[in-house]
Each structure stands twice: as C-alpha cells, then as structure tokens.
Image (tube, rainbow, N blue to C red):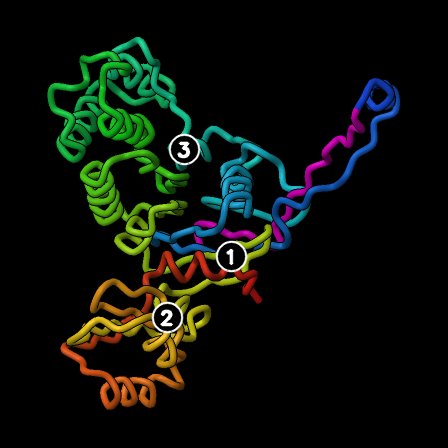
C-alpha cells in the first residue's frame, strides 16, 4: 500500500475584497465580501515507501499548500489524503512521529542557543531515550559533517551549517516520510551538494520516503527519478524526468562550433536560434525535423563540431510556464 495517497485534493481560500478610500474601508469593515482563490484543484497521486519524488511548479502553483495539507498543517477543502495510513489534519502523535517538514525559508532552531540545546528539546518532545539520542546524534553529526559545530549558537553558524543543523533537528526522531520545501534555498554550490548527498544517503540507509520541492533543478535531477508537476493548482504531469522532456519539450538542442563566425541572420534559417556567441551557435530543433536540419547544417555551414542533446530540464520547465503551454 502506498505511504502517501492524495485523491482529488483541493484547497480554496476566501480572500476579502476591499475597495480603496474611506468609503471602501467602512464597507469592508461593516459588510465584507470575499472572492474564492483556488490554490489546489483536484490533485491526485500516490507515493510508495522509499521513493524520492520531486514536486515542481512556479511560485504560487500550489506546492507549499499541498505539502501543508499532506502534513496536516491545513485542512483540505475537499478530497482525501492519507500519509502513513493516517489522516494528517488529525495531527495524531503516532502520525507526527513518522513525518517531518523542513522549510528552507523557516527555522525551528532557537537562534541564540547552541544547536545541542534545541536537539535535546526535540529528543524530549519525541520521547527519545538518552542512549538512543546519543546514537542518533553521533550518526547524524557524522553524516552531515557537523563535528565541532553543535556547541555554537545557531546565529554564529554559516547558512550551510545552519541548514544542516535544521535537517539534523528534523530527522532526530528518524521519520519515515520527509517533506522538504526548498531545503537548499540560499545555499552556495558546495553546501547544496552536501545536503543532496546527505539526503541520498539517508534515503538509502532508512528507505525514507521524500517529497521534495526546489527551484534548483540540480536537486531534482540528482535525487528524483520521478516528478510531479503542478500548474495553477492542478497536477499536469506525474512521471519520470525523461518523460517530462518527451511531453513538454518536443525539440532537441543542437550546439554547433563553426569555423568562422556568422551573423544571426545567416544562421537563423537552420532552427530556432537560442544563442550565438562568436563561432558557437545554439539551436532548438523539433524532434521530427532533427535529421533533416542537422544534414542541412553540415551541408551548408563549415562545422568544426556538432552535438545534439536534450535541453536543460530547468529550461523546459521555464518554457512550460512562461508560454502557458501546459495541457
């Protein structure tokens, strides 16, 4: 049985409408009117134990609202959701011991206290014995490379160290399901790599289920074989990363290194020109036209090198949302 089940999950928020001026303020105070904002609409999916699934979408698409419904922070307007065979919004103690939610833009650690103090509080909240606490603390400290940092006040840690400490606090009770909302937000490249490496190791070691949102596509491509794509509150894709390219990117990327630099006008006839920098030209070519287009380029232009690849996944996602091309 899947560990996460969402069926026709929807969330509608009433938003007050206020007209400008004193008259509008008085009317807003005495006779308030509302409009209905559909944050999530009829979302359905299941996730099996041990899966690492990427949850993609533009800002305001409904990702965080969905995560909050899955963790029981908000009640769905309609539909059904079960996580670890529990109804999340009941917030039962047994359910809370099995999940964790990490939000990159929010912190749970106490700012002026050493990390260890917050960890001891978490251990007490989850009823972790002293012996088990020491074992888990040592294991997570090693996995996250935080030796020598836990006695420092949280405010004195670097951003990357702080994010690792947040993960340690969130995983101290060894949850079965990890809901991660932008866990690498604002981190430098090295810190992002370390967090990704840790999450991969944790998933393999404990068969933990992970639902991950991120604006950094390197997080998704490194960790997730499957992705969910949400657009304007509706789930528009559920499948593999490769399948996402096939569905939403009906073109290939052709990079050409020319013997001599040509003008934009001279090369634009060979495909949708993405960029031209000196002798390097980059095209997007529809898949069904690829063979003919490459043959024309080789016949008509003086080519030093030519490569054909799928466009970067972040570019595909960006095109989907900017063009409104979601179907």
Badge 3 density bin: few <14, some 14–19, many ≥20, Cα 10 Å? some
Badge 1 density bin: few <14, some 14–19, many ≥20, Cα 10 Å? few
Distance, label 3 to label 1, CA atoms, is 26 Å
Image position, residue 280 (x, y; %):
22, 68
Q: Residue 103: which numbered mark, if any?
A: 3
Badge 2 density bin: few <14, some 14–19, many ≥20, Cα 10 Å? some
Please report whichever mark, 1 or 2, sits nearer to the chain's N-terminal start: 2
Do the CB atoms of the residues marked 1 and 2 lie less than 8 Å apart?
no
Image position, residue 273 (x, y; %):
37, 70
Distance, label 1 to label 2, CA atoms, is 18 Å
**Residue furthest top in the image:** 112
- Does residue 50 appear anywhere in the picture? no
Quadrant the C terminus occupies: bottom right
- Does residue 98 appear anywhere in the picture? yes
Is 42 on the left or on the right of 303, as rendered?
A: right
Image position, residue 240 (x, y; %):
38, 65
Q: Is residue 155 above or below residue 237?
A: above
Is 196 on the left or on the right of 179, as rendered?
A: left
Quadrant the N terminus occupies: bottom left
Q: Is residue 43 above or below residue 167?
A: below
Please report whichever mark, 3 or 1, sits nearer to the chain's N-terminal start: 3
Q: Is residue 205 above or below residue 246?
A: above
Q: Secondary structure at mark 1?
A: helix
Q: Secondary structure at mark 2?
A: strand
Q: Is 321 in front, or is 142?
A: 321
Q: Which residue position is annotated with label 2?
A: 273
Magenta residues (range): 1-20
Q: Residue shown at 33%/77% (left/top)?
A: 266
Mark 1 or 2, closer to the camera: 2
Is 231 on the left or on the right of 269, as rendered?
A: right
């Amino acid at each position: 049985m899947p560990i996460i089940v969402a069926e026709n999950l929807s969330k509608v928020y009433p938003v007050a409408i206020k007209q400008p001026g004193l008259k509008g303020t008085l009317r807003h105070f005495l006779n308030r009117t509302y409009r209905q904002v559909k944050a999530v609409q009829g979302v359905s999916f299941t996730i099996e134990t041990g899966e690492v699934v990427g949850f993609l979408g533009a800002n305001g698409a409904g990702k965080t609202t969905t995560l909050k419904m899955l963790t029981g922070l908000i009640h769905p307007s309609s539909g059904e959701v079960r996580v670890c065979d529990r109804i999340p919004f009941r917030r039962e103690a047994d359910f809370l011991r099995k999940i964790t939610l990490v939000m990159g833009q929010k912190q749970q650690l106490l700012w002026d206290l050493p990390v260890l103090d917050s960890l001891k509080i978490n251990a007490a909240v989850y009823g972790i014995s002293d012996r088990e606490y020491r074992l888990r603390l040592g294991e997570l400290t090693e996995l996250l490379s935080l030796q020598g940092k836990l006695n420092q006040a949280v405010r004195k840690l670097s951003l990357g160290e702080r994010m690792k400490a947040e993960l340690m606090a969130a995983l101290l009770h060894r949850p079965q399901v990890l809901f991660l909302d932008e866990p690498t937000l604002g981190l430098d490249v090295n810190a992002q790599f370390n967090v990704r490496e840790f999450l991969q190791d944790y998933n393999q070691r404990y068969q933990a289920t992970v639902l991950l949102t991120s604006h950094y596509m390197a997080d998704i491509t490194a960790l997730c074989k499957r992705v969910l794509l949400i657009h304007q509150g509706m789930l528009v894709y559920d499948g593999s990363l490769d399948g996402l390219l096939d569905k939403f990117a009906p073109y290939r990327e052709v990079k050409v290194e020319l013997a001599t630099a040509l003008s934009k006008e001279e090369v634009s006839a060979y495909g949708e020109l993405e960029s031209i920098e000196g002798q390097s030209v980059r095209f997007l070519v529809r898949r069904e036209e690829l063979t003919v287009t490459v043959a024309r380029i080789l016949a008509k232009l003086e080519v030093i090198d030519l490569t054909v690849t799928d466009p970067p996944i972040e570019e595909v996602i960006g095109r989907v949302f900017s063009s409104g091309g979601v179907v």
